[in-house]
Amino acid sequence: MKTSDLFIKLLENEGVKYIFGIPGEENLDFLNSLKNSKIKLILTRHEQGAGFMAATYGRLTGNPGVCLSTLGPGATNLVTPAAYALLGGMPMVMITGQKPIKKSKQGKFQVVDIVNMMRPLTKYTHRIVDGNNLPSVVREAFRTAEQERPGAVHIELPEDIASEEVDFRFFDIHPIQRPIADNKAIEQASEIIKKSKLPLLLIGAGANREITSGSLLKFIEKTGIYFFNTQMGKGVIDERHPLFLGTAALSADDFVHCAIEKADLIINVGHDVVEKPPFFMEEGKTKVIHINFFPAEVDDVYFPQSEIVGDIATSINKLTDMLSKQSHWDFSFYGRVKKEVDLHLTKYFEDNRFPVLPQRIVKGVRDTMPADGIVTLDNGIYKIWFARNYQTYQPNTLLLDNALAAMGAGLPSAIAAKIVYPNKKVLAVCGDGGFMMNSQELETAVRLKLNLVVIILNDGSYGMIELAQERLGSENFGLTFGNPDFVKYAESYGAYGHRITTTEHLNAKLDECLNTNGVHVIDIPVDYSLNYTILHKEIKEKTCTL
Protein backbone atom coordinates (compact mmCIF):
# COMPACT_ATOMS: atom_id res chain seq x y z
CA MET A 1 0.00 0.00 0.00
CA LYS A 2 0.98 3.65 -0.34
CA THR A 3 2.52 5.50 2.57
CA SER A 4 -0.52 7.80 2.64
CA ASP A 5 -2.85 4.78 2.92
CA LEU A 6 -0.73 3.46 5.77
CA PHE A 7 -0.84 6.86 7.49
CA ILE A 8 -4.65 6.85 7.50
CA LYS A 9 -4.74 3.27 8.80
CA LEU A 10 -2.38 4.27 11.62
CA LEU A 11 -4.56 7.27 12.52
CA GLU A 12 -7.61 5.00 12.62
CA ASN A 13 -5.69 2.67 14.89
CA GLU A 14 -5.03 5.62 17.22
CA GLY A 15 -8.77 6.26 17.45
CA VAL A 16 -8.78 9.48 15.40
CA LYS A 17 -12.32 10.55 14.48
CA TYR A 18 -11.73 13.97 12.93
CA ILE A 19 -9.02 15.80 11.05
CA PHE A 20 -9.36 19.59 11.05
CA GLY A 21 -7.65 21.52 8.31
CA ILE A 22 -7.04 22.65 4.76
CA PRO A 23 -5.37 20.29 2.29
CA GLY A 24 -2.99 21.42 -0.43
CA GLU A 25 -1.29 20.15 -3.55
CA GLU A 26 1.49 18.49 -1.55
CA ASN A 27 -0.86 16.28 0.48
CA LEU A 28 -3.29 15.17 -2.23
CA ASP A 29 -2.24 11.54 -1.77
CA PHE A 30 -3.09 11.85 1.91
CA LEU A 31 -6.45 13.40 0.98
CA ASN A 32 -7.24 10.61 -1.49
CA SER A 33 -6.44 8.02 1.18
CA LEU A 34 -8.67 9.86 3.65
CA LYS A 35 -11.68 9.63 1.27
CA ASN A 36 -12.12 5.94 2.04
CA SER A 37 -11.68 6.30 5.80
CA LYS A 38 -14.19 6.54 8.64
CA ILE A 39 -12.21 9.59 9.80
CA LYS A 40 -14.13 12.77 8.99
CA LEU A 41 -12.38 15.75 7.43
CA ILE A 42 -13.53 19.05 8.97
CA LEU A 43 -12.60 21.56 6.27
CA THR A 44 -11.88 24.96 7.82
CA ARG A 45 -11.36 28.44 6.36
CA HIS A 46 -7.94 29.01 7.91
CA GLU A 47 -5.25 26.73 9.31
CA GLN A 48 -5.19 28.69 12.56
CA GLY A 49 -8.86 27.88 13.09
CA ALA A 50 -8.12 24.21 12.38
CA GLY A 51 -5.31 24.19 14.94
CA PHE A 52 -7.46 25.79 17.63
CA MET A 53 -10.20 23.23 16.93
CA ALA A 54 -7.76 20.31 17.16
CA ALA A 55 -6.25 21.61 20.40
CA THR A 56 -9.69 22.08 21.96
CA TYR A 57 -10.69 18.57 20.85
CA GLY A 58 -7.60 17.30 22.69
CA ARG A 59 -8.40 19.36 25.75
CA LEU A 60 -11.95 18.02 25.99
CA THR A 61 -11.31 14.36 25.19
CA GLY A 62 -7.76 13.75 26.41
CA ASN A 63 -7.04 12.22 22.99
CA PRO A 64 -4.86 14.19 20.57
CA GLY A 65 -6.79 16.35 18.14
CA VAL A 66 -5.41 16.18 14.60
CA CYS A 67 -5.00 19.05 12.16
CA LEU A 68 -3.73 19.15 8.58
CA SER A 69 -2.07 21.73 6.38
CA THR A 70 0.01 21.92 3.26
CA LEU A 71 3.59 23.19 3.16
CA GLY A 72 4.90 26.77 3.49
CA PRO A 73 2.20 29.29 4.44
CA GLY A 74 -0.26 26.54 5.40
CA ALA A 75 2.23 25.14 7.89
CA THR A 76 3.34 28.52 9.22
CA ASN A 77 -0.31 29.29 9.99
CA LEU A 78 -0.19 26.49 12.56
CA VAL A 79 2.49 28.21 14.63
CA THR A 80 0.07 29.97 16.99
CA PRO A 81 -2.10 26.87 17.60
CA ALA A 82 1.08 24.86 18.24
CA ALA A 83 2.11 27.28 20.99
CA TYR A 84 -1.50 27.40 22.22
CA ALA A 85 -1.58 23.62 22.66
CA LEU A 86 1.94 23.37 24.08
CA LEU A 87 1.51 26.04 26.74
CA GLY A 88 -2.09 25.09 27.46
CA GLY A 89 -1.33 21.38 27.96
CA MET A 90 -3.61 20.22 25.12
CA PRO A 91 -2.68 17.06 23.15
CA MET A 92 -2.56 17.79 19.42
CA VAL A 93 -0.96 16.21 16.33
CA MET A 94 -0.15 18.47 13.37
CA ILE A 95 0.40 16.93 9.92
CA THR A 96 1.95 19.12 7.25
CA GLY A 97 2.88 18.49 3.62
CA GLN A 98 6.18 19.24 1.93
CA LYS A 99 7.74 19.29 -1.55
CA PRO A 100 9.33 16.05 -2.80
CA ILE A 101 12.63 15.59 -0.98
CA LYS A 102 14.30 13.26 -3.48
CA LYS A 103 13.65 15.17 -6.68
CA SER A 104 11.75 18.39 -7.28
CA LYS A 105 11.39 20.67 -10.29
CA GLN A 106 10.23 23.68 -8.26
CA GLY A 107 13.44 24.55 -6.45
CA LYS A 108 12.85 26.31 -3.14
CA PHE A 109 9.36 27.56 -4.04
CA GLN A 110 7.26 27.67 -0.83
CA VAL A 111 9.87 25.61 1.01
CA VAL A 112 10.35 26.50 4.68
CA ASP A 113 12.15 24.32 7.22
CA ILE A 114 8.95 23.51 9.10
CA VAL A 115 10.47 20.76 11.25
CA ASN A 116 13.02 23.12 12.80
CA MET A 117 10.46 25.93 12.95
CA MET A 118 8.20 23.66 15.03
CA ARG A 119 10.97 22.42 17.31
CA PRO A 120 10.57 25.03 20.11
CA LEU A 121 6.77 24.90 19.82
CA THR A 122 6.25 21.15 20.09
CA LYS A 123 7.15 18.15 22.23
CA TYR A 124 8.14 16.18 19.12
CA THR A 125 8.64 17.06 15.43
CA HIS A 126 9.67 14.67 12.67
CA ARG A 127 9.97 14.51 8.87
CA ILE A 128 9.10 11.18 7.24
CA VAL A 129 11.92 10.19 4.88
CA ASP A 130 10.98 6.51 4.64
CA GLY A 131 7.36 5.37 4.74
CA ASN A 132 8.33 2.13 6.46
CA ASN A 133 9.25 4.18 9.55
CA LEU A 134 5.79 5.74 9.72
CA PRO A 135 4.26 3.28 12.25
CA SER A 136 6.87 4.02 14.90
CA VAL A 137 6.76 7.77 14.22
CA VAL A 138 2.95 7.97 14.51
CA ARG A 139 2.87 5.89 17.69
CA GLU A 140 5.62 7.98 19.26
CA ALA A 141 3.88 11.21 18.24
CA PHE A 142 0.56 10.25 19.82
CA ARG A 143 2.22 8.84 22.94
CA THR A 144 4.24 12.03 23.39
CA ALA A 145 1.26 14.31 22.78
CA GLU A 146 -0.78 12.53 25.47
CA GLN A 147 1.98 12.11 28.03
CA GLU A 148 2.04 14.61 30.90
CA ARG A 149 2.38 17.48 30.31
CA PRO A 150 0.23 17.08 27.13
CA GLY A 151 1.00 19.28 24.15
CA ALA A 152 1.55 19.63 20.42
CA VAL A 153 3.56 17.32 18.16
CA HIS A 154 4.29 17.58 14.43
CA ILE A 155 4.78 15.17 11.52
CA GLU A 156 5.87 16.32 8.06
CA LEU A 157 4.96 14.08 5.10
CA PRO A 158 6.78 15.00 1.84
CA GLU A 159 4.84 14.54 -1.38
CA ASP A 160 7.06 11.84 -2.89
CA ILE A 161 7.23 9.80 0.33
CA ALA A 162 3.41 9.86 0.57
CA SER A 163 3.12 8.02 -2.77
CA GLU A 164 5.76 5.33 -2.09
CA GLU A 165 4.81 1.70 -1.63
CA VAL A 166 5.33 0.35 1.91
CA ASP A 167 4.49 -2.69 4.00
CA PHE A 168 1.51 -2.53 6.36
CA ARG A 169 2.18 -2.84 10.08
CA PHE A 170 1.33 -1.00 13.27
CA PHE A 171 2.28 -0.91 16.95
CA ASP A 172 -0.09 -1.92 19.71
CA ILE A 173 -1.33 0.95 21.85
CA HIS A 174 -0.64 0.65 25.56
CA PRO A 175 -2.18 3.01 28.15
CA ILE A 176 0.26 5.57 29.49
CA GLN A 177 1.29 4.71 33.03
CA ARG A 178 1.87 7.77 35.17
CA PRO A 179 4.57 7.42 37.83
CA ILE A 180 3.50 7.26 41.46
CA ALA A 181 4.91 9.81 43.89
CA ASP A 182 7.36 8.78 46.58
CA ASN A 183 5.56 7.89 49.83
CA LYS A 184 8.17 9.75 51.84
CA ALA A 185 7.37 12.98 49.98
CA ILE A 186 3.65 12.51 50.68
CA GLU A 187 4.30 11.83 54.37
CA GLN A 188 6.51 14.92 54.60
CA ALA A 189 3.81 17.06 52.97
CA SER A 190 1.14 15.70 55.32
CA GLU A 191 3.24 16.72 58.33
CA ILE A 192 3.69 20.22 56.91
CA ILE A 193 -0.07 20.52 56.41
CA LYS A 194 -0.84 19.26 59.95
CA LYS A 195 1.57 21.78 61.49
CA SER A 196 0.29 24.73 59.44
CA LYS A 197 -2.06 27.19 61.07
CA LEU A 198 -4.08 28.36 58.07
CA PRO A 199 -3.61 26.13 54.99
CA LEU A 200 -5.30 26.93 51.68
CA LEU A 201 -5.80 24.72 48.61
CA LEU A 202 -5.05 25.97 45.08
CA ILE A 203 -6.45 24.07 42.08
CA GLY A 204 -4.78 24.60 38.69
CA ALA A 205 -5.16 23.29 35.14
CA GLY A 206 -3.17 20.11 35.80
CA ALA A 207 -5.89 18.95 38.20
CA ASN A 208 -8.46 19.01 35.42
CA ARG A 209 -8.66 15.23 35.13
CA GLU A 210 -11.84 13.28 35.90
CA ILE A 211 -10.33 11.06 38.61
CA THR A 212 -8.41 13.97 40.15
CA SER A 213 -11.60 16.01 40.50
CA GLY A 214 -13.19 13.30 42.65
CA SER A 215 -10.03 12.88 44.71
CA LEU A 216 -9.84 16.61 45.44
CA LEU A 217 -13.47 16.74 46.51
CA LYS A 218 -12.82 13.96 49.06
CA PHE A 219 -9.74 15.86 50.30
CA ILE A 220 -11.75 19.05 50.79
CA GLU A 221 -14.67 17.32 52.49
CA LYS A 222 -12.42 15.40 54.91
CA THR A 223 -10.08 18.24 55.88
CA GLY A 224 -12.44 21.22 55.64
CA ILE A 225 -9.68 23.24 53.94
CA TYR A 226 -10.94 26.13 51.83
CA PHE A 227 -9.90 26.28 48.18
CA PHE A 228 -9.51 28.66 45.26
CA ASN A 229 -8.55 28.06 41.65
CA THR A 230 -6.65 29.50 38.73
CA GLN A 231 -8.47 30.59 35.59
CA MET A 232 -7.69 27.28 33.88
CA GLY A 233 -8.62 25.33 37.01
CA LYS A 234 -12.22 26.56 37.00
CA GLY A 235 -14.85 23.86 37.33
CA VAL A 236 -12.57 21.09 38.60
CA ILE A 237 -14.65 21.38 41.79
CA ASP A 238 -18.19 22.78 41.65
CA GLU A 239 -17.82 26.46 42.56
CA ARG A 240 -21.09 26.39 44.48
CA HIS A 241 -19.20 24.46 47.18
CA PRO A 242 -19.36 26.28 50.55
CA LEU A 243 -15.55 26.17 50.90
CA PHE A 244 -14.85 27.79 47.51
CA LEU A 245 -13.23 31.21 47.95
CA GLY A 246 -13.06 32.31 44.32
CA THR A 247 -10.85 32.43 41.24
CA ALA A 248 -7.51 34.21 41.17
CA ALA A 249 -8.20 35.98 37.88
CA LEU A 250 -5.53 38.54 38.76
CA SER A 251 -2.05 37.84 40.12
CA ALA A 252 -2.44 40.15 43.11
CA ASP A 253 -4.68 42.63 44.88
CA ASP A 254 -8.02 40.97 44.24
CA PHE A 255 -10.42 40.21 47.08
CA VAL A 256 -9.49 36.52 47.07
CA HIS A 257 -5.90 37.57 47.75
CA CYS A 258 -7.01 38.60 51.26
CA ALA A 259 -7.16 34.87 51.99
CA ILE A 260 -4.02 34.05 50.00
CA GLU A 261 -2.01 36.68 51.90
CA LYS A 262 -3.26 35.42 55.26
CA ALA A 263 -2.52 31.73 54.54
CA ASP A 264 0.71 30.32 55.97
CA LEU A 265 0.62 27.36 53.54
CA ILE A 266 -0.72 26.93 50.01
CA ILE A 267 -1.24 23.38 48.76
CA ASN A 268 -0.79 23.85 45.03
CA VAL A 269 -2.40 21.09 42.98
CA GLY A 270 -1.84 21.23 39.24
CA HIS A 271 -0.62 24.79 38.76
CA ASP A 272 2.76 25.56 37.20
CA VAL A 273 4.52 28.66 35.97
CA VAL A 274 3.28 28.27 32.37
CA GLU A 275 -0.10 29.66 33.40
CA LYS A 276 -0.11 33.28 34.56
CA PRO A 277 0.58 33.20 38.32
CA PRO A 278 -2.43 33.41 40.65
CA PHE A 279 -0.20 34.84 43.39
CA PHE A 280 3.41 35.91 43.95
CA MET A 281 5.62 34.06 46.43
CA GLU A 282 7.97 36.08 48.62
CA GLU A 283 10.95 34.91 50.66
CA GLY A 284 10.09 34.20 54.29
CA LYS A 285 6.33 34.35 53.77
CA THR A 286 3.69 31.82 52.73
CA LYS A 287 5.04 28.30 52.14
CA VAL A 288 3.96 26.21 49.13
CA ILE A 289 3.61 22.47 48.56
CA HIS A 290 3.82 21.63 44.85
CA ILE A 291 1.69 18.63 43.77
CA ASN A 292 1.91 17.83 40.07
CA PHE A 293 2.88 15.28 37.44
CA PHE A 294 6.29 16.91 37.15
CA PRO A 295 8.70 18.87 39.36
CA ALA A 296 8.31 22.57 39.91
CA GLU A 297 10.08 24.90 37.53
CA VAL A 298 11.62 27.41 39.92
CA ASP A 299 10.80 31.01 39.12
CA ASP A 300 11.36 34.36 40.84
CA VAL A 301 7.76 34.25 42.09
CA TYR A 302 7.40 30.49 42.50
CA PHE A 303 9.84 28.38 44.53
CA PRO A 304 7.93 25.71 46.52
CA GLN A 305 9.48 24.33 49.69
CA SER A 306 8.01 20.82 49.27
CA GLU A 307 7.10 18.71 46.23
CA ILE A 308 4.99 15.65 45.49
CA VAL A 309 5.79 14.55 41.95
CA GLY A 310 3.67 11.86 40.30
CA ASP A 311 0.10 11.02 39.40
CA ILE A 312 -1.97 13.76 41.05
CA ALA A 313 -5.07 11.72 41.86
CA THR A 314 -3.04 8.98 43.56
CA SER A 315 -1.04 11.58 45.51
CA ILE A 316 -4.18 13.34 46.72
CA ASN A 317 -5.82 10.05 47.73
CA LYS A 318 -2.79 9.07 49.83
CA LEU A 319 -2.57 12.55 51.33
CA THR A 320 -6.27 12.43 52.24
CA ASP A 321 -5.79 9.12 54.03
CA MET A 322 -3.06 10.69 56.19
CA LEU A 323 -4.97 13.85 57.08
CA SER A 324 -7.93 14.91 59.18
CA LYS A 325 -9.24 18.22 60.48
CA GLN A 326 -6.77 19.68 62.96
CA SER A 327 -8.04 21.20 66.20
CA HIS A 328 -5.78 24.24 65.84
CA TRP A 329 -7.13 25.16 62.40
CA ASP A 330 -9.45 28.16 62.59
CA PHE A 331 -10.92 29.00 59.18
CA SER A 332 -13.33 31.70 60.39
CA PHE A 333 -11.29 34.36 58.56
CA TYR A 334 -11.72 32.48 55.28
CA GLY A 335 -15.46 32.36 55.94
CA ARG A 336 -15.54 36.15 56.25
CA VAL A 337 -13.46 36.54 53.09
CA LYS A 338 -15.88 34.29 51.20
CA LYS A 339 -18.84 36.47 52.19
CA GLU A 340 -16.96 39.57 51.05
CA VAL A 341 -15.92 37.95 47.74
CA ASP A 342 -19.45 36.72 46.99
CA LEU A 343 -20.90 40.14 47.78
CA HIS A 344 -18.35 41.92 45.61
CA LEU A 345 -18.68 39.60 42.61
CA THR A 346 -22.47 39.90 42.47
CA LYS A 347 -22.51 43.67 42.96
CA TYR A 348 -23.40 44.58 39.36
CA PHE A 349 -25.36 41.47 38.38
CA GLU A 350 -28.69 43.33 38.32
CA ASP A 351 -27.36 46.59 36.84
CA ASN A 352 -29.38 47.25 33.67
CA ARG A 353 -27.51 50.26 32.29
CA PHE A 354 -26.89 50.25 28.54
CA PRO A 355 -24.43 49.57 26.92
CA VAL A 356 -24.20 46.46 29.06
CA LEU A 357 -21.69 46.01 31.88
CA PRO A 358 -19.56 42.85 31.47
CA GLN A 359 -20.66 41.63 34.91
CA ARG A 360 -24.29 41.80 33.77
CA ILE A 361 -23.39 39.78 30.67
CA VAL A 362 -21.73 37.15 32.86
CA LYS A 363 -24.93 36.94 34.93
CA GLY A 364 -27.07 36.61 31.79
CA VAL A 365 -24.92 33.80 30.43
CA ARG A 366 -24.91 31.94 33.77
CA ASP A 367 -28.69 32.32 34.12
CA THR A 368 -29.38 30.86 30.68
CA MET A 369 -26.67 28.19 30.31
CA PRO A 370 -27.38 24.73 31.79
CA ALA A 371 -24.95 23.26 34.31
CA ASP A 372 -23.22 21.19 31.63
CA GLY A 373 -23.31 23.91 28.96
CA ILE A 374 -19.92 24.88 27.56
CA VAL A 375 -18.74 28.48 27.31
CA THR A 376 -15.59 29.14 25.27
CA LEU A 377 -13.76 32.42 25.76
CA ASP A 378 -11.62 34.29 23.32
CA ASN A 379 -8.92 36.46 24.85
CA GLY A 380 -9.73 39.96 26.04
CA ILE A 381 -10.68 41.97 29.10
CA TYR A 382 -13.97 40.06 29.42
CA LYS A 383 -11.94 36.92 30.19
CA ILE A 384 -11.12 38.41 33.60
CA TRP A 385 -14.80 39.08 34.29
CA PHE A 386 -15.83 35.56 33.34
CA ALA A 387 -12.97 34.04 35.33
CA ARG A 388 -13.89 36.06 38.44
CA ASN A 389 -17.68 36.20 38.18
CA TYR A 390 -18.86 33.14 36.23
CA GLN A 391 -19.66 30.34 38.65
CA THR A 392 -18.56 27.10 37.01
CA TYR A 393 -20.29 23.90 38.04
CA GLN A 394 -18.54 21.15 36.07
CA PRO A 395 -15.06 20.54 34.60
CA ASN A 396 -14.43 21.80 31.07
CA THR A 397 -17.55 23.96 30.95
CA LEU A 398 -15.63 27.25 30.86
CA LEU A 399 -12.82 26.96 28.32
CA LEU A 400 -10.28 29.74 28.41
CA ASP A 401 -6.57 30.09 27.73
CA ASN A 402 -4.41 31.78 30.34
CA ALA A 403 -1.10 30.33 29.14
CA LEU A 404 -0.55 31.66 25.59
CA ALA A 405 -3.70 33.83 25.88
CA ALA A 406 -4.14 33.93 22.11
CA MET A 407 -6.85 36.00 20.47
CA GLY A 408 -8.98 34.35 17.80
CA ALA A 409 -9.53 31.00 19.54
CA GLY A 410 -13.04 31.53 20.93
CA LEU A 411 -15.13 30.63 17.86
CA PRO A 412 -12.96 27.69 16.67
CA SER A 413 -12.95 26.27 20.21
CA ALA A 414 -16.74 26.46 20.32
CA ILE A 415 -16.99 24.62 17.00
CA ALA A 416 -14.77 21.82 18.34
CA ALA A 417 -16.75 21.66 21.60
CA LYS A 418 -20.00 21.29 19.68
CA ILE A 419 -18.52 18.53 17.52
CA VAL A 420 -17.37 16.64 20.64
CA TYR A 421 -20.64 17.26 22.52
CA PRO A 422 -23.41 17.71 19.94
CA ASN A 423 -26.16 17.51 22.58
CA LYS A 424 -24.74 20.16 24.91
CA LYS A 425 -25.39 23.88 24.69
CA VAL A 426 -22.26 25.68 23.48
CA LEU A 427 -21.70 29.43 23.54
CA ALA A 428 -18.63 31.38 22.43
CA VAL A 429 -17.84 34.72 24.08
CA CYS A 430 -15.65 36.96 21.89
CA GLY A 431 -14.54 40.54 21.87
CA ASP A 432 -14.98 42.35 18.57
CA GLY A 433 -11.19 42.31 18.08
CA GLY A 434 -10.71 38.59 18.73
CA PHE A 435 -13.84 37.58 16.83
CA MET A 436 -12.66 39.22 13.60
CA MET A 437 -9.37 37.31 13.72
CA ASN A 438 -11.12 34.04 12.86
CA SER A 439 -14.66 35.14 12.07
CA GLN A 440 -14.53 33.29 8.73
CA GLU A 441 -15.07 30.07 10.67
CA LEU A 442 -18.73 31.09 10.94
CA GLU A 443 -19.04 29.53 7.48
CA THR A 444 -17.55 26.30 8.83
CA ALA A 445 -20.12 26.21 11.65
CA VAL A 446 -22.99 26.91 9.24
CA ARG A 447 -21.77 24.30 6.73
CA LEU A 448 -21.56 21.69 9.50
CA LYS A 449 -25.12 22.59 10.53
CA LEU A 450 -24.09 23.18 14.12
CA ASN A 451 -26.37 24.65 16.76
CA LEU A 452 -24.12 27.29 18.23
CA VAL A 453 -24.34 30.75 19.81
CA VAL A 454 -21.63 33.41 19.49
CA ILE A 455 -21.83 36.64 21.45
CA ILE A 456 -19.65 39.57 20.41
CA LEU A 457 -18.84 42.15 23.08
CA ASN A 458 -18.66 45.26 20.95
CA ASP A 459 -16.70 48.29 22.12
CA GLY A 460 -14.69 49.12 18.99
CA SER A 461 -11.30 48.78 20.68
CA TYR A 462 -8.74 46.47 22.25
CA GLY A 463 -10.11 46.77 25.79
CA MET A 464 -7.41 44.79 27.62
CA ILE A 465 -4.70 47.17 26.41
CA GLU A 466 -6.90 50.18 27.16
CA LEU A 467 -7.07 48.99 30.77
CA ALA A 468 -3.27 48.59 30.86
CA GLN A 469 -2.80 52.12 29.53
CA GLU A 470 -5.26 53.47 32.09
CA ARG A 471 -3.49 51.62 34.89
CA LEU A 472 -0.19 53.21 33.85
CA GLY A 473 -1.78 56.63 33.74
CA SER A 474 -1.35 56.83 29.96
CA GLU A 475 -3.81 58.33 27.53
CA ASN A 476 -5.54 55.72 25.37
CA PHE A 477 -3.83 55.60 21.99
CA GLY A 478 -3.75 53.32 18.93
CA LEU A 479 -6.45 50.90 20.04
CA THR A 480 -9.74 51.89 18.38
CA PHE A 481 -11.11 50.46 15.14
CA GLY A 482 -14.27 50.17 13.09
CA ASN A 483 -16.48 47.09 12.90
CA PRO A 484 -18.80 45.66 10.26
CA ASP A 485 -22.51 45.41 10.94
CA PHE A 486 -22.28 42.12 12.82
CA VAL A 487 -25.95 41.26 12.20
CA LYS A 488 -25.55 41.55 8.43
CA TYR A 489 -22.12 39.95 8.62
CA ALA A 490 -23.59 36.86 10.31
CA GLU A 491 -26.45 36.70 7.84
CA SER A 492 -24.03 36.82 4.90
CA TYR A 493 -22.66 33.46 6.09
CA GLY A 494 -26.11 31.97 6.53
CA ALA A 495 -26.14 32.46 10.30
CA TYR A 496 -28.74 34.36 12.29
CA GLY A 497 -27.78 37.86 13.41
CA HIS A 498 -29.12 39.60 16.53
CA ARG A 499 -28.36 42.86 18.32
CA ILE A 500 -29.08 43.73 21.95
CA THR A 501 -30.62 47.20 22.24
CA THR A 502 -31.80 47.09 25.84
CA THR A 503 -30.18 45.24 28.74
CA GLU A 504 -33.55 44.03 30.01
CA HIS A 505 -33.90 41.82 26.91
CA LEU A 506 -30.45 40.19 27.25
CA ASN A 507 -31.52 37.01 29.06
CA ALA A 508 -34.53 36.46 26.82
CA LYS A 509 -32.41 36.78 23.67
CA LEU A 510 -29.74 34.43 25.01
CA ASP A 511 -32.38 31.87 25.94
CA GLU A 512 -34.06 32.17 22.54
CA CYS A 513 -30.81 31.64 20.64
CA LEU A 514 -29.63 28.78 22.83
CA ASN A 515 -32.88 26.94 22.19
CA THR A 516 -33.23 27.64 18.46
CA ASN A 517 -31.40 25.58 15.84
CA GLY A 518 -28.65 27.13 13.74
CA VAL A 519 -25.68 29.42 14.27
CA HIS A 520 -26.64 32.61 16.12
CA VAL A 521 -24.47 35.71 16.46
CA ILE A 522 -25.48 38.29 19.08
CA ASP A 523 -23.93 41.77 18.94
CA ILE A 524 -23.84 43.19 22.48
CA PRO A 525 -22.62 46.77 23.00
CA VAL A 526 -20.49 46.60 26.14
CA ASP A 527 -19.57 49.25 28.71
CA TYR A 528 -16.04 48.81 30.04
CA SER A 529 -15.90 52.19 31.77
CA LEU A 530 -15.78 50.64 35.25
CA ASN A 531 -12.90 48.25 34.49
CA TYR A 532 -10.18 50.33 36.10
CA THR A 533 -12.32 51.42 39.04
CA ILE A 534 -13.33 47.89 39.97
CA LEU A 535 -10.24 45.89 39.03
CA HIS A 536 -7.65 48.28 40.41
CA LYS A 537 -8.85 51.33 42.34
CA GLU A 538 -11.69 49.67 44.28
CA ILE A 539 -9.69 46.53 45.06
CA LYS A 540 -6.57 48.41 46.14
CA GLU A 541 -8.69 50.38 48.59
CA LYS A 542 -9.96 47.17 50.23
CA THR A 543 -8.87 46.10 53.68
CA CYS A 544 -8.13 42.52 54.66
CA THR A 545 -8.90 43.02 58.36
CA LEU A 546 -12.16 41.12 58.19
Image: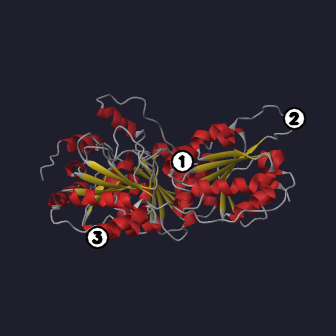
In the picture, measured across the screen, residue 262 lies left or right of residue 155, that is: left
In the rendered image, which residue does mark 2 sit on? 105
Q: In the rendered image, which quarter contains the N terminus? A: bottom right
Separation (CA) of disc 1 from disc 3: 33 Å
**Decide: marks 1, 2 in contact (CB < 8 A)?**
no
Other residues around mark 1 within 10 Å, as few (<14) / some (14–19) / many (≥20): many
In the rendered image, residue 538, in percent from the top left (x then y), is placed at: 21, 44
Separation (CA) of disc 2 from disc 3: 68 Å
Marks 1 and 3: which is nearer the front? 3
Element assignment for label 2:
loop
Separation (CA) of disc 1 from disc 2: 36 Å
In the rendered structure, find residue 527 and report the number of the disc placed on it.
none
In the rendered image, which residue does mark 1 sit on? 86
* Residue at the spot 84% in from the left edge and 46% down from the top edge: 160
Q: Quadrant of residue 144?
A: bottom right
Residue 394 visible, this orientation:
no
Mark 1 or mark 3: name the one nearer the start of the chain.
1
**Decide: marks 2, 3 in contact (CB < 8 A)?**
no
Q: Amino acid at mark 1?
A: Leu
Marks 2 and 3: which is nearer the front? 3
Single out the residue that lies furthest toward the left. 545
In the rendered image, residue 385, in percent from the top left (x then y), is placed at: 34, 51
Residue 122 visible, this orientation:
yes
Element assignment for label 3:
helix
* Residue at the spot 49% in from the left edge and 63% down from the top edge: 426
Q: Amino acid at mark 3?
A: Glu
Mark 2 or mark 3: name the one nearer the start of the chain.
2
* Residue at the spot 46% in from the left edge and 52% down from the top edge: 294
In the rendered image, which residue does mark 3 sit on? 221
In the rendered image, residue 167, in percent from the top left (x then y), is placed at: 84, 59
Other residues around mark 2 within 10 Å, as few (<14) / some (14–19) / many (≥20): few
In the picture, measured across the screen, residue 84 lies left or right of residue 262, that is: right
